[in-house]
Amino acid sequence: MGKWELLLKQFWNLLWVLLIGASCLSLLQFFLDTSELINLWITLILFGMIFVMCLVSWFQEMRARQVVHGFQRLLPQCSQVIREGKESSISAPDLVVGDVVHIKSGERVPADLRLLHCIQLRLEASSITGESEPVEYQSEEVSERFSVFEARNVAFNGSLCVEGEGFGSQKRK
């Protein structure tokens, strides 16, 4: 949907349609009795408010679309996956629970994974965990006293592999 279509779509909000109807009635009342200028002022104020509010809604929706587009760029497009014993390249949205994903240096993690095997795997997950430096991950079980965010055997969707490689199983969609 283009920018202009999106702007016109803002005017189809039920509240705005009702206010446009009210301002049209006020304008009609002004034309029936031109001595009452208050009806003209009400019409102008309502049209002005509707226009400004539609512009604000349009601007917010455009910014929200930019944010979503930015997040989509962070997600990997395709991943090397072992499914039913065969390795293939699968797009990230098509991953299913139980797929074993091969993570390599320079790639983003396509889903939340429980790590099964790691070779000097270091991930940068600052947007998720708050760690400013890449952290080394491992496949060994961790104690239950650690939260999932502290566990070093769980790789989160969107993390960047900066070194090494590993295999992980997708646990949830």
Image (cartoon, grey):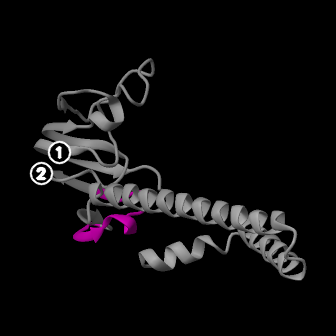
User: Which residue occupies the foreground of this view, 75 or 17?
Assistant: 17
Residue 106 numbered tag: 2
Please indicate whether residue 111 sits to the left or right of residue 122 in the image.
right
Residue 161 numbered tag: 1
Please indicate whether residue 68 sits to the left or right of residue 85 in the image.
right
Question: Does residue 165 belong to the magenta stretch?
Answer: no
Which residues make up the magenta segment?
Answer: 85-100
Query: x%, y% of residue 170?
Result: 38, 52
Earlier-in-chain disc, 2 versus 1: 2
Residue 41 numbered tag: none
Please indicate whether residue 164 sits to the left or right of residue 83 in the image.
left
Q: Is residue 134 above or below residue 98?
A: above
Q: Are marks 2 and 1 in contact (CB under 8 Å)?
A: yes
- At label 1, counting other C-alpha atoms closer than 10 Å, the crowd grade (few under 14, some 14-19, many 20 or more) is many
- The quadrant holding residue 148 is top left
Question: Does residue 88 belong to the magenta stretch?
Answer: yes
- The quadrant holding residue 22 is bottom right
Q: Please name the residue shown 44% across and 17% down the image.
A: 145
